[in-house]
Amino acid sequence: MKDTFAPDIETESSTTNDSLEPESDQHQKGPKPKRSFVGKFLRRRIPIIKWLPNYKKNWLINDAIAGITVGLTVVPQSMGFAALAGLTPEYGLYSSYIGCFLYILLGSCRQVTVGPVSLLSLLVFQTCGTDFPQCAIWIGFWSGVIQLLMAGLQLGVIVSFISEPVTVGFTAGAAITTISAQIKNLLGMTVANGSGIVSIWKELFRHYDTVTTGDAVMGIASFLALLFLKRVKDFKAPEGRRNQFWKKFFWYVTVARNALIVVTTTIVAFIWTDPPFQLTGNVQSGLPSVAPPRFSLPAENYGNGTDSAEILDFWETWQKYSTAPLVAAIIAILQNVAISKAFGSGQSVDATQEMLTLGVTNLFGSFFSAIPSCGSFSRSAVNDASGVRTPMGGLFTGILVLLSLAFLTPSFYYIPKASLAAVIISAVMTMIEYQALIPMWRISRFDVITCVITFVGSVFLGMEYGIVIGVGISVAALLIQTLRPPMGPELKVDIETGLKYLLVKPEGGLKFPSIDHLRTQVNKVTYRYSHVRIIVIDMERWTSWDYTAINSLVALVRGMKKIEISLIFLNCSDQWPKAFEAAGLKNPPCCKNSGQLSEFLASTTKPRLSV
């Protein structure tokens, strides 16, 4: 998912996700000073309080270089993602500086850069259509509210239910859909916007004759140039004293490839009196007006900046677009947590903190006309490879975006749409992790099935359905394993007594929902091995229990006794007999180890039970 390239010229800081704790806290000797509850809460939820007191002057240079380098990537990407969302380019820029500034205060991973991304832009387009900024801003606001609620309820644990195969399938499906949606701009086709990948490709094949030579040449050439520049960093630098210079030069060419392509094609379009390819057109300059989002949207948007006369009220608007904010919130959280894990060098990730950060960013950003935002894999990789030391790098990225809005928007008129489409396609291609399928197949074939089903659902049904289906399959598999753990019986002979018994060993431990399965399996074993009158259940992996489980086991012991079958529990902790006695079973058949089992069999089991 990430576009990783880290040259040998990186600073020492870029090798790990350094802890942002002040050195005074990490290395101070003696007892730590006691802090109030409020102080602890603020230090935990506003990370800048921890790392800013320890900020070093020489880090500023690293952060400045990284922030400016990321800015060269974010400006063309954000404009392209705005187009992907069906909006004019300035909305991408509006969404690219708010997150950078806020993440300095609240961010927990120094590499993360927050802004518009392809997944959320595609969701906005699928929900709102073309030229409907009020809808996009509305989604951003309510996704922020949902993320804040999830953070307040400490729901970071829900991220654990979304497995890696689901994430791989979901992002690959979104990438394929994004690429499909950009084909028309890459080739300059006159095609209606499709609501799904099937309708998109139907329209592309139906109107293949609308391909324009100028746009196709510009788009394909830009795409091939981006692929070439991505590999420039791998060029072998000349030997000698200038080796480091050329390494650094090749690396910066790779990092700034998006900006280089956009600037080059813009210059070509500006020089060309009547270019044979489509241009971006006017981009509104200056900062957006600060205003709250509209909570009642028009019933219809005509795609030309005009709305229908009918205005939906608050609840009608929610009924029409209700799933989009929730899906946007989940996608953003998933992506931020995934990026933090990728660059965290094995450190634990506080998903609740990421929820809080994204919630504040999207909620606050909606007042500045920002569309839904989250961390970007490619820009975070650039940030990491540039040697960023702290989240302060976002300050320079945000300033560069603001300068672009203030002074460079007239030049954005000449940016070819085909080159922006090439930038988007090359950016999302890395999200298709096809190489993960082979090791996934070798480890767990069920994970491959989950990944493929999630991918198909995301592509053909929509992103919101794809991720719901994927998570549903993962949770269902988890529940099935809990309800029906493998416990294959094994016929054994006790060496001390010579008695035969059946050993039943639940592989994954037991919880109260799986008690019925255990009882059923014991009954099946009884009929299958009718000549064996002793059944031993190994409780080694069953470390906790509840009222339902204990009562069911007591009933099972008494039921087996009626048909003259001894049910014995092996590897029981000291708490097991107490639990059984509390449920009314006197002298419970519990053994701590195999030695006690032999003694128990010798003292309580009659020889006639043996064959």
Image: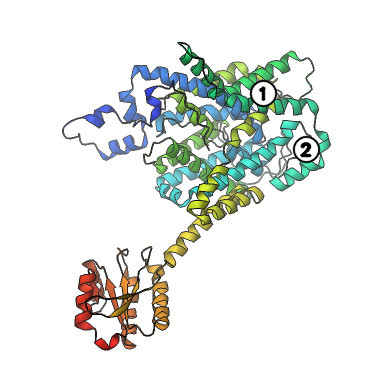
Foreground: 542 or 66?
542
Q: Percent x, y for residue 191?
A: 78, 38
Q: Which residue is drawn at 75% across and 26% down?
A: 217
Judging from the image, what secondary structure is the residue with disc 2 in? loop
Q: Is residue 475 above or below residue 553?
A: above
Crowding near the residue tagged with mark 1, few <14, some 14–19, many ≥20 C-alpha atoms within 10 Å = some
Outermost residue toward the top?
241
Q: Mark 2 points at which residue?
A: 191
In terms of image quadrants, where is residue 291?
top right
The residue located at (20%, 34%) in the rendering is: 33
- Residue 586 visible, this orientation: no
Which secondary structure lies at badge 1?
Answer: loop
Question: What is the CA distance from the residue labelled 2 to the residue labelled 1?
Answer: 23 Å
- Mark 2 Cα within 10 Å, few/some/many (few <14, many 20+)? some
Q: Can residue 362 be seen in this view?
A: yes
- The percent coordinates of residue 11 (x first, y second) are 40, 21
Disc 2 marks a residue whose amino acid type is Val
Q: In x, y percent, where is residue 219?
A: 71, 28
Q: Which residue is drawn at 56% across and 20% down?
A: 253
Quickly name the residue at label 1.
Answer: 283
Of tags 2 and 1, the one toward the viewer is 2
Pick out the residue farthest to the left: 30
Above or below, 15 against 439 in this view is above
